[in-house]
Image (cartoon, rainbow, N blue to C red):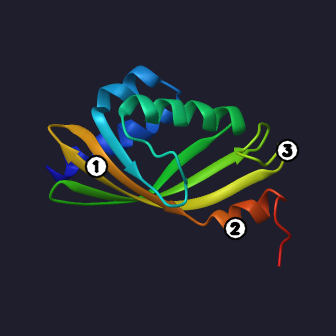
Amino acid sequence: MSSANKSLVLTFVEAINAQDWARVLAVTAPDFKRHSTAAGAPGVRSAQDLVKFLQAEFITFPDAVEIVLDLVAEGDKVAARHQFFGTQLGPMGTFGPTGKALNATYLAIYRIENQRIVEAWAEWDNLAGLKQLGHVPAD
């Protein structure tokens, strides 16, 4: 089961990178929930919310790509360390586009049920990202 769960997370990331929203919906449960203090409100409370969030992310970072660096699975959970790359060419909340690149690592834990991702917890360092993009002065 661990290898199947890891493969499901890899398929999920590949679908996001390809902007294949039908495949994202196919691997997530309709009532998917994502927990993230870093992402702020409103939260992602369904697979459809997730697709809307990701589509908005691609407006902000049209060249976005994620790479899975590490996967560890136990029981119904998969922990992942991701690398995100993207150039901010669109608005990000109240922050206008800068044309600068973001290179950020984030951590996520996915809960799998019936071969679908039903829940995720994702956190990253917002301050470091804002500094890279020029929205906050660097130290």
76 sits to left or right of 15: left
Q: Is residue 130 depicted above or below 91 in this figure? A: below
* Along the line of sight, the residue nearer the viewer: 93 or 112: 93
70 sits to left or right of 65: left
Q: Is residue 136 visible?
A: yes
Of the residues shown, which amino acid type is indicated by label 2? Ala
Marks 2 and 3, how far apart in space? Answer: 16 Å
**Badge number at residue 21:** none
Q: Nearer the viewer, mark 1 or mark 2?
A: 2
**CB of mark 2 within 8 Å of CB of mark 3?**
no
Would you name the residue on which mark 1 appears?
6
Quarter of the C terminus within the rendering? bottom right
Residue sticking out furthest to the top: 22
* Along the line of sight, the residue nearer the viewer: 91 or 112: 91
Q: Residues within 10 Å of mark 2 (few under 14, many from 20)?
A: some
Residue drawn where x is 13% and y is 49% of the image: 1
Marks 1 and 3, how far apart in space? Answer: 34 Å
Residue drawn where x is 85% and y is 44% of the image: 99
Q: Residues within 10 Å of mark 1 (few under 14, many from 20)?
A: many
Q: Is residue 62 visible?
A: no
Residue 23: x percent and y percent?
38, 25
Would you name the residue on which mark 2 appears?
128
Query: Mark 3: which secondary structure?
Result: loop
